[in-house]
Amino acid sequence: MMELLRGKKAFLFDLDGTLVDSMWMWKSIDVEFLGRYGYECPPGLHKAIEGMSFSETAVYFKERFCLPLATEEIKRIWTEMSIDKYRYEVPPKRGAREILSYAREHGIGCGIATSNGREMVDAVLEALDLEPYFQVVATACEVKAGKPEPDIYLKVAMDLGARPEECLVFEDIPAGILAGKRAGMTVCAVDDPFSRYMEEEKRSLADHFIRDYFELLGKETGEAL
């Protein structure tokens, strides 16, 4: 895996399912939220919203389920429902802290490019004490188009002062992998139970695939293999 890390000046991470183990949480939130308005969570819902920004997802829910709420109110409710889970129930992905330590030790910049809301990102980074590792945090609400468009990855790279070819993207879903590839970056797909049924698609789209970050690092030494 040494070749994968060589020459990179920036590591760019998605959040849910990539940096932290949180995709299970969103399914439970969707079930509870839709249940309040008499709906069951339909099959294929999460595939339909894959890669959408937080705001785009709120619009989608409002229109698809005819919700009697403004999109800002939907986002507020989701934020309230998720923050406690982010603070107390969401762990980092296996080896995530170690790959971030490796980046810091080798002068590699780190950024987050997420479709999530900023309050939620701040909550999980603070709870897990990951804030010091990141120089840039951006959400898809800050750019013109969400994933699979490349906008958010291009923004984070620019803010880190890195060219696309100097960036290594970590992603767990096809829309995010496509966003990184369309940005002209190397993309490493990360295994996650939530998207395991899409593993073949993830492998076909990404440059590399890992089960956890320890595949990139020596478990005892922390050195690139």
Image (spheres, helix red, strand yellow):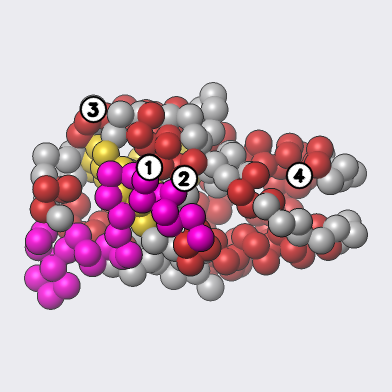
Q: Residue at x 33, y 69 (%)?
A: 94
Mark in the foreground, 1 or 3: 1
The residue drawn where x is 11% and y is 48% is 3
What residue is pinned by disc 4? 61
Mark 3 or 2, closer to the camera: 2
Amino acid under label 4? Answer: Phe
Can you identify the residue that label 1 sits on? 205
How many badges with numbers are in the image? 4
Mark 3 vs mark 2: which is more N-terminal? 3
Q: Amino acid at mark 3?
A: Arg
- List the residue tagged with mark 2: 174
Q: What SS does tag 2 mark?
A: helix
What residue range appears in magenta? 197-225
User: Residue 139 in the image: x percent, y percent?
Assistant: 50, 39
The disc, 3 or 4, on the residue closer to the chain's N-terminal end is: 4
**Contact (CB < 8 A) between labels 2 and 1?**
yes
Question: What distance separates the C-alpha of mark 2 from that of mark 1?
Answer: 7 Å
Residue 64 image offset from top left, x and y in percent:
81, 42
